[in-house]
Image: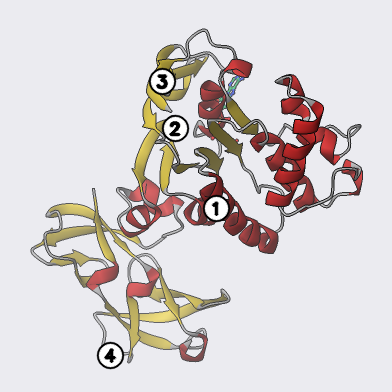
Amino acid sequence: MRLEDATVSFGTRAALNSVDMAVAEHEIVCVLGPSGSGKSTLLRVVAGLQPLDTGRVLLAGHDQGGVPAHKRGIGLMFQDHQLFPQRDVGGNVAFGLRMHGMRRAEREARVRELLRLVGLPGAERRAVATLSGGEQQRVALARALAPRPRLLMLDEPLGQLDRSLRDRLVVELRDLFEELGTTVLAVTHDQGEAFALADRVVVMREGHVAQSGTPLEVWRRPVDEFVARFLGFDNVVEAEVSGETAVTVWGKIPVPPNSAQGARKLLVRPAGVRLVGADEGVVACTVASRTFRGSHVALRLQPAGGPSLEAACALKDAPEPGTGVGVLFSPDDVVVLD
Ligand SMILES: Nc1ncnc2c1ncn2[C@@H]1O[C@H](COP(=O)(O)OP(=O)(O)OP(=O)(O)O)[C@@H](O)[C@H]1O
């Protein structure tokens, strides 16, 4: 799929602003972004449900201008595309196959195969109302995959499910797409989901692409403050970078070699904030709060001057609120932003 210079405006507001984007065959791309950044509009444009003001959508090199949604060969699993409650599970999964005029015996075999793939073997005759939320999601996925779409598009695929189920399903989805060689364009506002599912993530901001890269690239090197904060990094500070040192309100912070120089914003990942004795660090702080995060403890540290700092440390090393600590920074977790 290739999107070229795609623009869609509602009134004076551009929901998509000259977006260029591509999804290669067999690739899984997740579009991430805050509410209102244009993610759903992008999916609707590719699906043929939303006309473009300018630009074009290409599938396998062919311009889709004038091609109606049902002729694009795209599988959709949208938040508002609920299952048909009056049909049983098999009837739901077979829906697209019937539309394509597939014969009954072939249809039944395909439905059986799909239900096996999504982990619901033998569920053909179950009523939709008897399914849990996670099971309904699997049936919706089987329905979208059944006609072997050349592109599968998912809008908040796991949006309404609880955390533990999402964590499990996202791994299953990835395995399933790999097994089937499905090309996927998914949209989510949940970065954990995007990072676990995608070969590549695209971060959107106000109708344009803020950053595109592998999950690791985006995580390690967010391009700017917007992307950094969207990923949940709050330690962003003004800095004057000179050589491999940055001067900030948090003291002198070492930066990686070849970083951009001059007046910049600096991101310090919480893992790069090391606690030392109260008078050993480059900045003295008081522990303002402690939040248990499962794998680690998030500490909010308040220096005498300047904004607070977030640090991550092991539960056994976490000091009590009110404790005075010193802070050192490790350059591996420092990023000079553009
Ligand atoms: N049919 C419409 N009419 C008018 N404005 C619209 C319409 N659809 C979307 N918009 C506006 O376009 C912008 C982008 O909306 P879109 O639904 O694409 O964002 P989103 O990133 O999917 O948000 P969310 O995560 O909340 O679903 C928003 O400002 C929205 O209000």
Q: Nearer the viewer, mark 1 or mark 2?
A: 1
Q: Nearer the viewer, mark 4 or mark 3?
A: 3
Q: Earlier in the sequence, mark 4 or mark 3?
A: 3
Q: Earlier in the sequence, mark 3 or mark 1?
A: 3
In percent of the image, x 40 and y 24: which residue is there?
3
- What's the mark number on residue 174? 1
Badge 2: how crowded within 10 Å, few (<14), some, or many (20+)? some
CB of mark 4 near ligand 1 (< 8 Å): no
Judge by depth and name the residue closer to the eye, 192 or 63.
63
Q: Quadrant of ligand 1?
A: top right
> In the rendered structure, which amino acid carries the disc numbered 2?
Glu
> In the rendered structure, which amino acid carries the disc numbered 1?
Arg
Give the image location of residue 159, x and y in percent. Answer: 66, 47
> In the rendered structure, which amino acid carries the disc numbered 4?
Asp
Using residue 195 as the reference point, say whether residue 329 is left or right of it.
left
Badge 3: how crowded within 10 Å, few (<14), some, or many (20+)? many
Judged from this view, the residue extending furthest toward the left is: 243
Rendered view: 316 above or below 143:
below
Using residue 54 as the reference point, say whether residue 223 is left or right of it.
left
Give the image location of residue 61, x and y in percent. Answer: 38, 20
In percent of the image, x 36 and y 66: which residue is there?
269
